[in-house]
Amino acid sequence: MEWLEKFNKVFESKIRLGLMSVLVVNDSLSFNELKELLQLTDGNLASHLKALEEIKYVEFQKQFNGRKPLTTYKATEDGHKAFTEHLQVLENMIRQNL
């Protein structure tokens, strides 16, 4: 099971897999957009985003929309690469087991 060793453990979490899925196909999304899309609580979303930030897969930008704070997130180049490689491993595994 050589392919199993190539799995990126970060994406074993369904939430992190979901986060990266939506962030790689969008330029950036706000915290509230991510929360709504993935149906997560504030705390759950924040903890998974922090984990992805710490390994440099996601970055954020804080700004103001009028007087309201707005935090947006986007996948980094490293995040795109890691996610794409993870998907490739999954695809290879499926092809080998068909």
Image: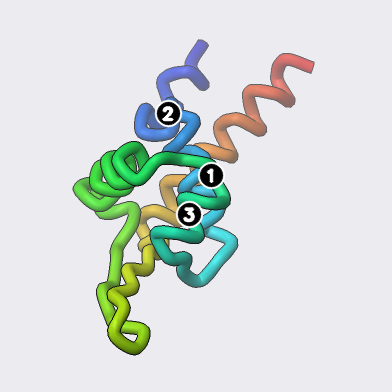
Q: Earlier in the sequence, mark 3 or mark 2?
A: 2
Q: Which mark is residue 13?
A: 2
Q: CA distance from mark 2 to mark 1?
A: 13 Å
- The image shows residue 47 at horizontal and vertical percentages of 27, 40
Q: CA distance from mark 3 to mark 2?
A: 16 Å
Q: Earlier in the sequence, mark 2 or mark 1?
A: 2
Q: Residue at x 55, y 32 (%)?
A: 89
**SS class of the residue under badge 3?**
helix
Q: In the picture, residue 98 is in which quadrant? A: top right
Which residue has dot 3 on it? Answer: 34
Q: Which mark is residue 20?
A: none
Q: What's the residue type where badge 2 is placed?
A: Ser
Seen as rendered, the residue at the extreme left is 54
- The image shows residue 26 at horizontal and vertical percentages of 55, 66
Which residue has dot 1 on it? Answer: 38
Do callouts 3 and 1 mark residues in contact (Cβ within 8 Å)? yes
